[in-house]
Image (cartoon, rainbow, N blue to C red):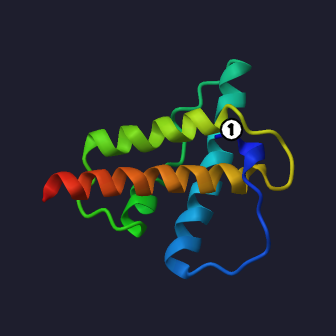
Amino acid sequence: MKLDDVKLGVMRLPADVEIPLYLIREGLRVQVFFSGLSKVGFDESRFYGDFGNVVLKTMGFDKLDDELLIFYMKLLEQYSEVIEEDGDCYTRAALLVYLEVLTEQRKRKSKAF
């Protein structure tokens, strides 16, 4: 699914959805910023802020293993590469990341049973 395919309207989301979406959006902004720094030769690794643990905890993951954190970071990298600087692009990308994390959560729950 492309970012342009997701159309956003004005609506109020429940807090248990709004908070992770906000954190994912900010994580994408950080990812884009530090990717830009890396492209011009700055070593940004010491300053990188990671919201992954908080996002996954607010989405209901009890156990945060390395595999899950790597999955989340790869999603941020993937979607940050296609972000364009328009008003809704970060929100659309955050929504797609959120949906992919929910899908992963359902897969993990089904394997547990």
Q: Residue at x 64, y 55 (%)?
A: 25
Residue projecting furthest to the right: 86
At 32% from the left and 45% from the top, the residue drawn is 68
Residue 10 percent coordinates (x, y): 79, 74
Dot 1 corresponds to which residue?
32
Check disc 1 and report its element: helix, strand or loop. Answer: helix
Q: Is residue 46 above or below residue 20?
A: above
Q: Nearer the viewer, residue 104 or 59?
A: 104
Specify the quadrant of the image occupied by residue 87: bottom right
Q: Nearer the viewer, residue 112 or 77?
A: 112
Q: Is residue 3 left or right of residue 52?
A: right
Q: Residue at x 39, y 56 (%)?
A: 53
Q: Give how far across and how far down residue 73 sits, in percent.
A: 46, 40
Determine the image quadrant of residue 36.
Answer: top right
Locate the N terminus and report the quarter of the image it occupies: top right
The answer to whether residue 4 is left or right of residue 112 is: right
Count of numbered badges drawn on the protein: 1
Above-or-below relation of 8 to 3? below
**Which residue is found at the position 49% from the left and 76% from the top?**
16
The furthest residue to the left? 113
Label 1 CA crowd tier, 10 Å (few <14, some 14–19, many 20+):
many
Quadrant holding the C terminus: bottom left
Tell me which amino acid carries mark 1. Val
Q: Position of residue 14 (x, y in %)?
A: 56, 81
Q: Is residue 15 left or right of residue 113?
A: right
